[in-house]
Image (cartoon, helix red, strand yellow):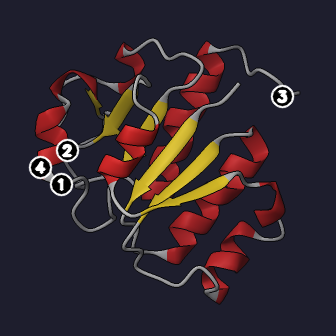
Amino acid sequence: MALHIVLVEPEIPANTGNIARTCAATGIHLHLVRPLGFRTDDATLKRAGLDYWYAVNIEYHDSFREVEEKYSGSRFFFATTKARKRYTDFKFQDGDFFVFGKETKGLPPEILEAHPDTLMRMPMTDKVRSLNLSNSAAIIVYEALRQLDFPGME
């Protein structure tokens, strides 16, 4: 089983570290798209991931286009507050990619415009603009894993 999280230009090392820990706990592959808002040897990044970095299958990419080309034929889902569909409206399958944008701006408009049918959001009140990136990634990943009956997990 191989699900994937793609972080496009993440800015906050603690969020990426938390997502890496979720990936280690679930067997999800992590893709980081440059430029990153931190160095990968950043102490905050390492602290957030604790001592689980050895268990993370991680790839670095220079652009989101590079990810799409390398994994052409795969299904990509895009988390955005601008979506009409909720993440629970989709039926996920092995091999799916979940794409998240940078903390301050989300995904670039050109990515959103290129994938209108697979944009997804999480319901929330109008009191906040968005959820924390690492929380959003965990929510979506665990929904996908639930749909797949938590393969390889106890």
Q: Position of residue 137 (x, y in %)?
A: 50, 45
> Given contact means CB atoms under 8 Å apart, are the residues at marks 4 and 1 in contact?
yes
Query: Which of pointers 3 and 1 indicates the residue nearer the eye?
Result: 1
> Given contact means CB atoms under 8 Å apart, are the residues at marks 4 and 3 in contact?
no
Structural distance between the alpha carbons of marks 4 and 3: 36 Å
Q: Residue at x 65, y 15 (%)?
A: 148
Q: Is residue 113 above or below residue 133?
A: above
Structural distance between the alpha carbons of marks 4 and 2: 5 Å
- Judged from the image, the secondary structure of the residue bearing numbered disc 4 is helix
- Judged from the image, the secondary structure of the residue bearing numbered disc 2 is helix
Mark 3: few, some, or many residues within 10 Å (few <14, many ≥20)?
few
Q: Is residue 123 above or below residue 52?
A: above
Structural distance between the alpha carbons of marks 3 and 1: 34 Å
Q: Which residue is mark 1?
A: 108
Q: Which residue is mark 4?
A: 109
Q: Which mark is residue 153?
A: 3
Q: Residue at x 73, y 55 (%)?
A: 56
Residue type at the position of mark 4 = Pro
Q: Which residue is mark 2?
A: 111
Quarter of the image containing the N terminus?
A: top right
Of residue 15 and residue 41, the one placed in the foreground of this image is 41
Q: Quadrant of residue 62?
A: bottom left
> Given contact means CB atoms under 8 Å apart, are the residues at marks 2 and 1 in contact?
yes
Residue type at the position of mark 3 = Met
- Judged from the image, the secondary structure of the residue bearing numbered disc 1 is loop
Query: Which of pointers 3 and 2 indicates the residue nearer the eye?
Result: 2
Quarter of the image containing the C terminus?
A: top right
